[in-house]
Image (cartoon, grey):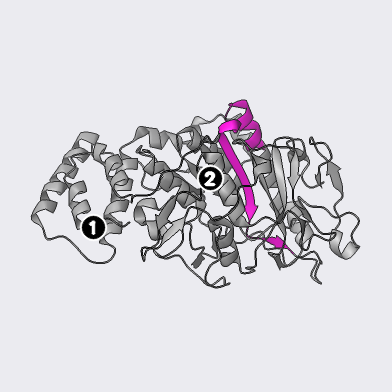
């Protein structure tokens, strides 16, 4: 999947930005096409690094012992018979728009491997936090959604997959595998913002062109570079293809006023920015909406630096004071905003984390890692709202009915986008074909 030297020379012969979209398309391999009638055109993934407590948010257990249930009572929602935690009053009024899946499960309790299983739909080769991405990785569903968009002809200046404000990680040393291009190569790497949309001087680093260089001069420079490339010896060193592909992406973004506008939050009213919340999470959700309006296929907005939801200590104080308020405000405002703009039907919104947290409260008033059963939420994009899929047992420890795998979530997302995940394949670095997802579509949701 990674372009050869000939592909590099072909790009360098290009005389401007018009060739970049074609170049990206030519980096894609051949796959079997399988397209169905999906409702969603784009996806916003709200990912909560560190794993929120399912019992304290989406799956309250009021009849359990006080060592399990915690201090929060369940409240009624806009969906008949569906209750969620009192920590989520704003989201309770949206319950008719979303579905809660309460029986998601896997077996990796390490943060990075747990995040990998959630976003890739498959287990990593080891259960560990001390792992990092590679070009051998199985790609995440965000990566694959972007790859499919490119395959289907997306060639605009904006990348089809964007992560804001920072990547999935456990510390900045260990990044979650799968979230980048992986085996599909650097052409499928997402644009990772690595900037705070709430900062007063927020801008995407190096997006604006250099002031003294006009667009015409930049085109002429590219033409000259192409001529020089024809005279030189091709660079065959490892990483040379990556460099040229990322340079192509950067030039495409720099040459597009539409791309700069999509990232320009100053074009939003102060009232709208206030609605989302003047914090990193709120402004990242607002940016996600702007990006899908501009044609980006998949946006991940990461709620929290590193594993901020890892509440081994003071679970309840942290949920109440610092974690839930900005998350709920941003999420509920995003749903309102998408409805007001007529975008919810075409935008699939997915809320998830690494895994859940232990039913039993530990001695530090915290909850520990628990992948055996947890909750996630889906809204818009053809999803039937107002329902609960699956049931956990009396203390939220294990699925009691309708167990759901992360792969099933992925198959459902692809189906909502119009793809049959069992009929589309890509290839690993060693040439092995892989299904888009080996999960089962959750038919009750669509």
429 part of magenta stretch = no
Q: CA distance from mark 1 to mark 2?
A: 30 Å
- At a point 51% along the width and 63% down the height, the residue shown is 176
Which of the labelled discs sits on residue 331, or is there none? Answer: none
- At a point 61% along the width and 45% down the height, the residue shown is 350
Choose mark 1 or mark 2, whichever is in front: 2
Do labels 1 and 2 touch, CB within 8 Å? no
Query: What range is drawn magenta here?
Result: 333-357
Residue placed furthest toward the left: 231
Residue on which the image places disc 1: 4
For marks 1 and 2 on the same chain, the one whose residue lies earlier in the sequence: 1
Image coordinates of residue 270 in percent, x first then y, are 58, 31
Determine if residue 259 is in view.
yes
Image coordinates of residue 205 in percent, x first then y, are 40, 48
- At a point 75% along the width and 45% down the height, the residue shown is 388
* Callout 1 crowding tier (Cα within 10 Å): few <14, some 14–19, many ≥20: few
Image coordinates of residue 90 in percent, x first then y, are 75, 38
Which of the labelled discs sits on residue 414, or is there none? Answer: 2
Q: Quadrant of the N terminus?
A: bottom left
Image coordinates of residue 391 in percent, x first then y, are 78, 53
Q: Which SS class for mark 2?
A: helix
> Which one is in front, 97 or 413?
413
């Amino acid at each position: 999947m990674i372009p050869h030297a000939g592909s590099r020379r072909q790009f360098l012969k290009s005389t401007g930005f018009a060739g970049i979209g074609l170049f990206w398309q030519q980096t894609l391999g051949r796959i079997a096409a399988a397209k169905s009638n999906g409702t969603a055109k784009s996806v916003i993934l709200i990912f909560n690094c560190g794993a929120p407590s399912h019992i304290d948010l989406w799956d309250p257990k009021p009849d359990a012992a006080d060592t399990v249930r915690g201090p929060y009572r369940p409240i009624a929602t806009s969906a008949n018979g569906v209750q969620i935690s009192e920590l989520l009053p704003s989201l309770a009024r949206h319950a008719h728009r979303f579905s809660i899946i309460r029986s998601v499960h896997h077996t990796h309790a390490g943060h990075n491997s747990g995040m990998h299983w959630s976003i890739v739909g498959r287990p990593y080769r080891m259960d560990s936090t001390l792992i990092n991405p590679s070009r051998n990785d199985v790609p995440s569903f965000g990566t694959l959604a972007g790859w499919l968009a490119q395959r289907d002809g997306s060639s605009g200046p904006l990348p089809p997959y964007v992560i804001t404000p920072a990547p999935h990680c456990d510390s900045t040393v260990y990044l979650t595998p799968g979230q980048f291009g992986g085996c599909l190569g650097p052409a499928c790497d997402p644009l990772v913002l690595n900037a705070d949309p709430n900062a007063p001087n927020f801008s995407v680093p190096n997006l604006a062109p250099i002031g003294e260089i006009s667009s015409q001069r930049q085109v002429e420079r590219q033409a000259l570079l192409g001529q020089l490339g024809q005279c030189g010896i091709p660079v065959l060193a490892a990483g040379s293809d990556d460099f040229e592909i990322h340079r192509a992406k950067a030039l495409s973004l720099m040459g597009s006023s539409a791309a700069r506008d999509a990232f320009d939050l100053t074009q939003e009213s102060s009232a709208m920015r206030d609605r989302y919340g003047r914090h990193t999470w709120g402004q990242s959700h607002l940016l996600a909406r702007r990006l899908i309006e501009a044609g980006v296929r998949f946006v991940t907005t990461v709620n929290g630096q590193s594993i901020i939801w890892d509440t081994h200590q003071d679970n309840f104080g942290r949920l109440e004071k610092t974690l839930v308020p900005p998350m709920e405000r941003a999420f509920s405002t995003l749903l309102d905003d998408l409805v007001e703009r007529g975008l919810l039907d075409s935008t699939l919104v997915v809320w998830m984390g690494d895994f859940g947290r232990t039913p039993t409260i530990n001695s530090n008033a915290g909850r520990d890692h628990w992948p055996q059963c947890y909750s996630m939420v889906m809204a818009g994009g053809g999803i039937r709202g107002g329902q609960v899929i699956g049931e956990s047992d009396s203390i939220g420890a294990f699925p009691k009915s309708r167990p759901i795998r992360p792969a099933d979530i992925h198959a459902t997302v692809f189906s909502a986008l119009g793809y049959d995940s069992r009929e589309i394949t890509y290839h690993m670095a060693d040439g092995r074909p892989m299904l888009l997802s080996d999960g089962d579509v959750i038919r009750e949701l669509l």
